[in-house]
Image (cartoon, rainbow, N blue to C red):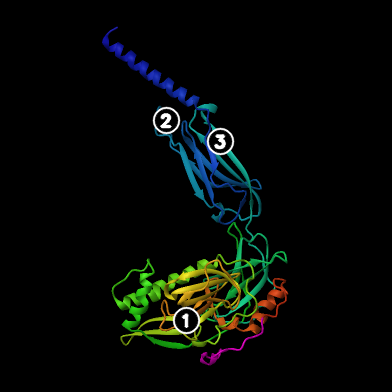
Amino acid sequence: MNKKSLFYAIALAIVAFYLAMTAFYRWGDGTPPRITLVEPFSQAGPTTPLVLHVEDAGTGLQEVTVRLVQNLESYTLAQEQFVAQSPFSIGGNAHTSYDLTLVPFDDDTIPKRRGLVTLVITARDYSWRGFFEGNWARLEQNVAVKFTPPRLEVLSNPLPVSQGGAGVVIYRVSDDAQRYGVRIGETFFPGYPNAERAFTAFSLFAFPHDLPASTPVFLVADDSLGNHAEQRVDVPVIAKTWRSRTITISDRFIERTVRPIIAQTPEIEDLDDPLRNFLQVNNVLRKRTTDRLTAMASDSRPEFLWNGAFIQLSNSKVEAAFADHREYRYGGKIVDTQYHLGFDLAVTKRYPVEAANDGIVVLAEFFGIYGNTIVIDHGYGLQSLYAHLSSFAAEKGDVVRKGHTIGRSGMTGLAAGDHLHFSLLLHGAQVNPMEWWDGQWVQSHVNGPLHRASLRPNDAGTPKRDMQNRSDVSPPSP
Ligand SMILES: [Zn+2]
């Protein structure tokens, strides 16, 4: 044997050995791909996601097909072919995994039929088993599909509601609803189930002071599968006009009020300019405070903690009313405008501040533009806020009764003089406290309808208190 033929023999042996190894590897791969539904589901609707993971550790994936089968008809959701690795390589560039996320019923080509549908996922690898067919894997699952939204039906005849005022809607909602309530513009007022009557619920809502009276009021419900129901509620809305006030601000005022706010609010930095400091506190911080109030409302207790009418601070004079439109004048120019959402009530300096109704203190701390502030949760999203306090007489977690002293009035935060700023909020939306101070209104607009729906015992509410020093408040315009 010469050198040349020895070389050929060795080369041939190497090739033969390699082919044998490849064949052994390809025949030997007896493990089919593994199909996994990452987020398994047995019910599906318009937004249910399909999250798929397919794996093949051996010769690699050849194809994956995802289909829906209903009434012997098949709809292909996805079909993927993978290029084979180079014919004689072992492992190497094989497609060992495949991931897919899609929303099957988002596709318009899939008929939106109710009932059972079978999800069929098949995958095969590049094994030479099964007469070079590959190893097959198959996952089949029955899925109940639902495209019908929850059912809604208004049960109460909603009373007229004022801009900036509140109301209640009582309704029936099917038990597939996961989230439901009243929506006006962008504002959502969640509903609560009525434990006394199956499938009925109620929402306390506020008509935002800054939305046109023509804005529709909707009852909405969503199930967990992406089906959405929306129904217009026929609520007559009484338009209001708000007062305008001009407030002149000086460097001295900014120095006295804004600087301590910035000092106690780490997320706001000192811009070293009186006007810019004022504007960021009056805008950025005001907005943040509002957002925090909305977030706090989501933890409101699902129970009626309040009883009868709310009380206005005793002996107080109204210095500013709900939704006064304020123009801020600085150096002869209007530099900002805001709505004053609440009442400014003044008596004497460091006057004892009374809880307006029964509830639980959920905040007692320095709170941005409001200075030292107490927030009381009255349940079902209704909360009262007491701002600019000079001292606290209650702390977070305290159960308070109507009339109890919770602090003393002061001028902390953005306040020109000693007074109590009082706000009432429904799920973070400011409402006009005048309604809630009026025992007759509370009875006819809230407690009465709730009583008729078995939600509250018959409670005529506390007798209507004399309106104190209301001369400053413009009469409500119809
Ligand atoms: Zn105020």
| Amino acid beneath label 2 | Gly
Identify the element where label 1 is drawn: loop
Q: Earlier in the sequence, mark 1 or mark 3?
A: 3
Q: Earlier in the sequence, mark 2 or mark 1?
A: 2
Left or right: 216 as drawn, with respect to 244: right
Quarter of image, res 413? bottom left
* Residue at the bottom extreme, as displayed: 471
Residue 467 painted magenta: yes
Q: Which residue is mark 1?
A: 350
| Residue 221 visible somewhere in the drawing | no
| Amino acid beneath label 3 | Ala
| Amino acid beneath label 1 | Arg
* Mark drawn on residue 215: none
Q: Nearer the viewer, residue 320 or 193?
A: 320
* Mark drawn on residue 91: 2
Marks 3 and 2 in Cβ contact (< 8 Å):
no
Total numbered badges shown on the rendered structure: 3
Q: Give coordinates of residue 132: x percent, y percent.
A: 51, 28
Identify the element where label 2 is drawn: loop
Q: Is residue 440 above or below residue 363?
A: below
Q: Which residues are magenta?
A: 462-478
Q: Residues within 10 Å of mark 2 (few under 14, many from 20)?
A: some
Quarter of image, res 216? bottom right
Identify the element where label 3 is drawn: strand
